[in-house]
Image (cartoon, rainbow, N blue to C red):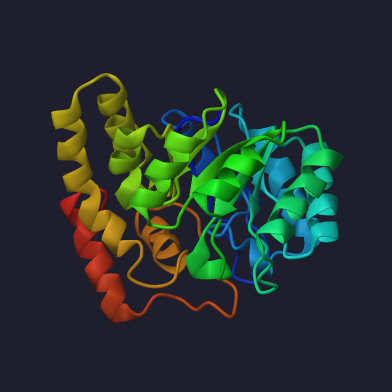
Amino acid sequence: MFRGVIPALVTPFKEDFSVDYEGMARNLDYMEKYVDAFVPCGTTGEASTLGYEEHVDVVRFVAETSKLPVIAGSGSNSTREAIWLTKEVEKAGAEAAMLVTPYYNKPNNLGLYEHYKAVAKEVSIPIIIYNIPSRTGINVSPQLMLKLSEIENIVGVKEASGNLKQVSDIIRLVKKKDFTVLSGDDFLTLPILALGGKGVISVAANVAPNLMKELYNAFVSGNIAKAMEIHHKLSPLFDALFIDTNPIPVKKAMELIGLSAGKPRLPLVELSEEKTEKLKKVLKELGLL
């Protein structure tokens, strides 16, 4: 469950911005034969604008529709809310939970530790920490990650700091056998695998799951030259999917290749025409359009 290629799922919307469950089923079918697990209701899934009932319903739908493990986003900047939501996604069928660091509040290291400890104590499913300082305003240091890894059901981190030195230090310091470091940036998948990471929670896998899995398989089979070749082939896509705030570009990319996405909910807006043309060019070069 905690290795390989794991798409951070888009939440597709209809024209009235209600969740498009039929479209979600088509998207899951498109990816399922290539990937290793699914992450619904993370950043890419627009969790911040889903209502609580929608959030749990989306997790339940993915768990019931897919045969793959589900790692549900369930983080909050309120510890009480994070506990409640993690309990709810566990009941909805999630095999694990991914909790973003508490944003806006800016807790110190002790507060971060106590936050995760409190959630972990209340649920039986494994927990992955989601470290993304660019969105939350705080960073989980390697030393704090080491301390957090000692909590029994904290089993890994989605590392989206963009800091390879930090990733290297986490892997070096945390000796716990079943602790997993996953890349939170598609572009850094190959470097993080080379440092000892176990996979990626991926935006690009919504669009090109086969190529992402080819990259991963090439690396783990020892064909580093092939992995490098695929990495460079995919690099323009990695860039294009962050030409604007995630998930604006990936939703447009999915729409362009015939998958379900819909417009993002406000305050996010649809990709501009100029950026859409750049995205189209990359998709055509990859043979996706």
Q: Is residue 24 left or right of residue 202?
A: right
Residue 257 picture location, percent across and down:
35, 54
Q: Quadrant of the N terminus?
A: top right
Residue 134 picture location, percent across and down:
48, 68
Question: Vertically, is 106 above or below 236?
Answer: below
Considering every residue shown, the one lying at the far top of the view is: 221
Quarter of the image for residue 146 reads top right
Question: Vertically, is 207 above or below 93?
Answer: below
Q: Is residue 18 left or right of residue 114?
A: left
Of residues 30 and 140, which is closer to you in this image? 140
Question: Vertically, is 159 above or below 212?
Answer: below
Q: Is residue 196 left or right of residue 11?
A: left
Which residue is painted at 83% across and 44% down in the image?
87
Quarter of the image for residue 34 reads top left
Residue 209 picture location, percent across and down:
38, 39
Which residue is painted at 22% across and 52% down in the image?
235
Of residues 284 and 103, which is closer to you in this image? 103
Q: How many marks?
A: 0
Instruction: Residue 39: tell me if it is visible.
Output: no
Q: Is residue 93 left or right of residue 202?
A: right
Instruction: Residue 34: tell me if it is visible.
Output: yes
Which residue is painted at 59% across and 79% down in the image?
266
Quarter of the image for residue 137 reads bottom right
Of residues 128 and 27, which is closer to you in this image? 128
Residue 163 picture location, percent across and down:
37, 55
Of residues 259 and 234, which is closer to you in this image? 234
Which residue is painted at 29% across and 63% down in the image?
240
